[in-house]
Image (spheres, rainbow, N blue to C red):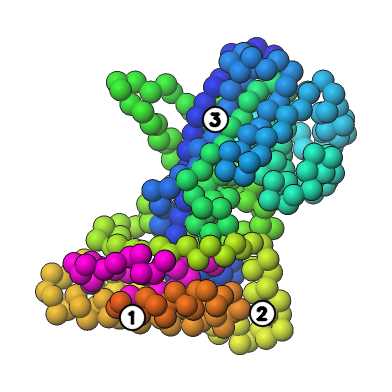
Amino acid sequence: MMMSLARPVRTSAPGKVILHGEHSVVYGKIAFSASLNLRTSVSFHPECVSKKPGLLVFKYTDKNLKSDWSLSLSTQKLLSLLQREKDLKFSMLEDKQKAPHFVNKDLVHFITNFLEEYTSDNTKLKPLLVFLYVYLLLFLSHDRLSLIGSVVSVSSEIPLGAGLGSSAAYCVALSSCLLSSISIISCPPATGGQRFYRWPQTDLNIINKWAFLLEALIHGVPSGIDNTVSCFGGCIKYCRDSSITLNILERCRILLVNTLVSKDTKVLVEKVRQRKEEFPDLIQSIMASINEICVQFEKLWFALSQTSERAKRDSLYSKLETLIDVNQNLLNALGVGHPCLDKVCHLSLKYGLHAKLTDSISCMTNTNRIWRRRLRLDTLN
């Protein structure tokens, strides 16, 4: 292949915090989420830059993970599989979506078996699976490209397994990096002292489609909210297959507390599904209530933006705090709570804070009304 067809690229994507609607969003309900100023970065260096001819190197600093493969040896099985599977072949130039519409289970199974020769650690297996899946599809489905030696490096500021969107940020950053490298989406060089470049909406839509596909490899049946807020940033109102960017958090300060209890989103989603099958009407009622919390949350934040009167604002904040408390109790009823979360919620109340989980093991609380106090945040440690 022409080496100029693949170029070195470095991209990053933010983590997220779900304000209201976690778990119920999987079943088509409304959710609100916002991006964080913690990011995951991915860099791609083709062999002409990395000086690793014929060697594919993958490094994930935060997972203490490094793997490399000789393309002339290790990938022969994968290549033969791709050549047999006609449904994996699609023209990136002719497909207006520029993304596959489904996860190919045969390819996933084959890559998983292939990787088990290198590691049996599931926390390391998943990022490798995601990387090889998108790498192989992109490079082998493009008529003008073939596999090349390269170095892919990943680093993250987002706590892993903390419910802050580390996997979604990884999927968004990895997709955007590889898509930019082979010119499926734009990647103009920074000019005029620019350090960062933001893609146009059409490119972001393509990145988001790929990221959702990769999230499915990790979580099974993702709602799509994590990759969407990581891809587009800001605060969004999300319902399956649609999202609206909002400007409702300009004056909202949130304290995030990491309980340090690791979780697996896929396991928790499955737990809720099983409970829903056992008590369908009951769980549906809980999810409808969480959806109504989201509706009321949006109304209250809009009302806050329309008034500067102190008494009215205090009344609105009080109602927002009630929504946080009710939502936390409903999430416990779904079975996704944890004793450490209950402890953080109890301690928070002692300092006038109202807390709830955010996608499982971090607690979120609105601190707007007490920010002027000299609150010792280390008392919650």
Image quadrant in which you'd find residue 77: top right
Q: Which mark is residue 232?
A: none
Q: Locate residue 65, reporting x and y percent.
A: 66, 39
Residue annotated with mark 2: 276
Q: Is residue 277 visible?
A: yes
Q: Residue at x 72, y 84 (%)?
A: 278
68 relative position to 85: left or right: left
Please state which of residues 302 and 242 is positioned toward the viewer in this rendering.
302
Q: Which amino acid type is marked by label 3? A: Ser
Residue annotated with mark 3: 43
Classify mark 1: helix, strand or loop: helix
Q: Which mark is residue 350?
A: 1
Q: Is residue 19 above or below residue 131?
A: below
193 relative position to 26: left or right: left
Please state which of residues 81 and 218 is positioned toward the viewer in this rendering.
218
Classed neighbour count for the residue bearing mark 3: other residues with Cα under 10 Å, few (<14), some (14–19), many (≥20) = many
Q: Is residue 19 visible?
A: no
Q: Residue at x 56, y 69 (%)?
A: 23
118 relative position to 292: left or right: right
Of mark 2 and mark 3, the one earlier in the sequence is 3
In whole angstroms, how far apart are the C-alphas of marks 2 and 1?
A: 34 Å
